[in-house]
Amino acid sequence: MSLHGAYDDQNIFAKILRGDAPAVKVFEDDQVLAIMDVFPQSEGHVLIIPKARARNLLDLPGEAASAAIERVQRLARAVDAALKPDGVMVAQFNGAPAGQSVFHVHFHVIPRWADRTIAGHGQAGQADVKALEALAEQIKAAL
């Protein structure tokens, strides 16, 4: 994969944004969709997906990037308020060598607890949908 390759409308996040694939939604507005990560690195792992058609942060228009960061901050605050972790990690990968596995720009909000290890990016098992829905409700209530 190239950092500057063509955008693929069949990537899973494009399908979720179109409603062609399921997701556990946390938040949505005209700029982003926030969903629970089905392969969470930590309990409460949220993905914020800009609606702009961009492979990575380098391709994301400035206004969309600004809007996305505002939503990332809002979701990170909600995760912190709802789950009371010891810390919150925000991650974003650009290109396969950097760890990007879905080629639609997205941000990870990952709660961290001092006494818990997290799974590596892309190495976690699939979470139970009912558990994700319960976490999503907790986070929504804190928005």
Image: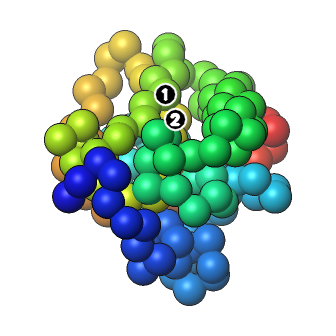
Task: Name the amino acid type tagged 1.
Answer: Val
Q: Which mark is residue 109?
A: 2
The answer to whether one can see residue 47 in this image is no
Label 2: few (<14), some (14–19) or many (≥20) C-alpha neighbours in 10 Å: many
Position of the N terminus by quadrant? bottom left
Say which residue appears at 56% left-offset and 86% top-offset. 20
Determine whether 129 is above or below 18 in the image.
above
Instruction: Mark 2 or mark 1: name the one nearer the start of the chain.
Output: 1
Seen from the viewer's position, the closer of residues 36 and 9 is 9
Q: Position of residue 102 (x, y in %)?
A: 35, 59
- In the rendered image, which quarter is residue 118 located in? top left
Q: Nearer the viewer, residue 61 or 101?
A: 61
- Nearest to the observer: residue 82 or residue 50: 50
Residue 109 spot, x, y in % from top left: 52, 35
Q: Can residue 143 be seen by looking at this rendering?
A: yes
| Residue 51 screen position, x and y as percent | 66, 60
Residue type at tag 2: Val
Mark 1 Cα within 10 Å, few/some/many (few <14, many 20+)?
some
Q: Is 86 placed left or right of 101 in the picture?
A: right
Q: Is residue 120 left or right of residue 77?
A: left
* Residue under label 1: 90
Q: In the image, is 39 to the left or to the right of 138?
A: left
Q: Is residue 3 left or right of residue 70?
A: left
Q: Secondary structure at mark 1?
A: strand
| Residue at x 57%, y 62% (from the top left corner) | 53
Q: Contact (CB < 8 A) between labels 2 and 1?
A: yes
Report the Cα–Cα distance between label 2 and label 1: 5 Å
Q: Nearer the viewer, residue 96 or 27?
A: 96
Residue 72, quarter of the rendered image:
top right
Q: Residue at x 50, y 16 (%)?
A: 87
80 above or below 139? above
- Helix, strand or loop at mark 2: strand
